[in-house]
Image: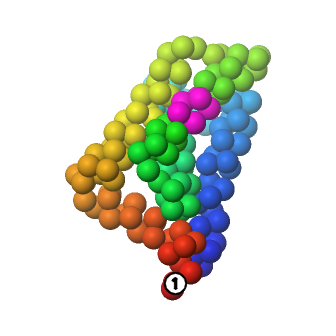
Amino acid sequence: MKALLRFLLVIAPFLYMIFIFILSSLPSDAIVNTPFSWDQAFKESLHLIEFGILYGFWVLFFLIQGKFTRKTSILSAVLAIAYGFSDELHQYFVPYRSATVIDLVKDTIGVLVLFSIVKISYFGGKLPRLKRLLNRIEGLNNKNAEGN
């Protein structure tokens, strides 16, 4: 079971990036279309969450490898932000989508919020529950799991 969990955490960022690409290839109302007036605002706010999640998956990727450090945390943020940029570039060429700088800013803010949370919990010792959770995930890496 631990091997399956490790495998899923290793492939998670890649699968999620494929998922983002697929969603970006579809019209914005292809998956969810609500009759509410706040539908567009809701979908726009998802940029804040979408790429923060991608950063989180990269954190899990490095944790499970036993290679999560301050540098790989920054690398994870850079990867997520760069993918946000490539997603906007991709949407520029999709006829029924749009690419905007404000979307890239929202993507970046989402990444930076989770980056800050990870920084203060994992590296700073605050938010001890989150730190314990991240440490438990890190404990699943192959080197530690071989001793079990």
Q: Give the percent coordinates (x, y) of residue 36.
A: 49, 28
Residue 73: give x, y in percent of width and height.
46, 44
Residue 112 as seen in the image, left or right of residue 129: right
The stretch of residues the image draws in magenta is 78-84
37 versus 111 height, above or below: above
Q: Which is nearer the eye, 117 or 74?
A: 74
Question: What residue is shown at x 50% (from left), y 28% (from top)?
Answer: 107
For the point 64% across and 65% down, the residue is 7
Residue 110 position by quadrant? top left
Q: Would residue 39 be seen by someone viewing this image from the given angle?
A: no
Query: Which residue reaches farthest left?
Result: 126
Q: Residue at x 28, y 46 (%)?
A: 120
Quadrant of the image occupied by residue 88: top right
Label 1 sits on what residue type? Gly
Residue 90 pos. (x, y %): 72, 23
Q: In this view, does 138 lie above or below 85?
A: below
| Residue at point 59%, 29% (across, down) | 82
- In the rendered view, tell whether residue 76 sits above or below residue 89: below
- Asked whether residue 22 appears in the rendered view, the answer is yes
Q: Quadrant of the N terminus?
A: bottom right
Judge whether residue 83 is colored magenta. yes
The one nearer the camera, 1 or 64, is 64
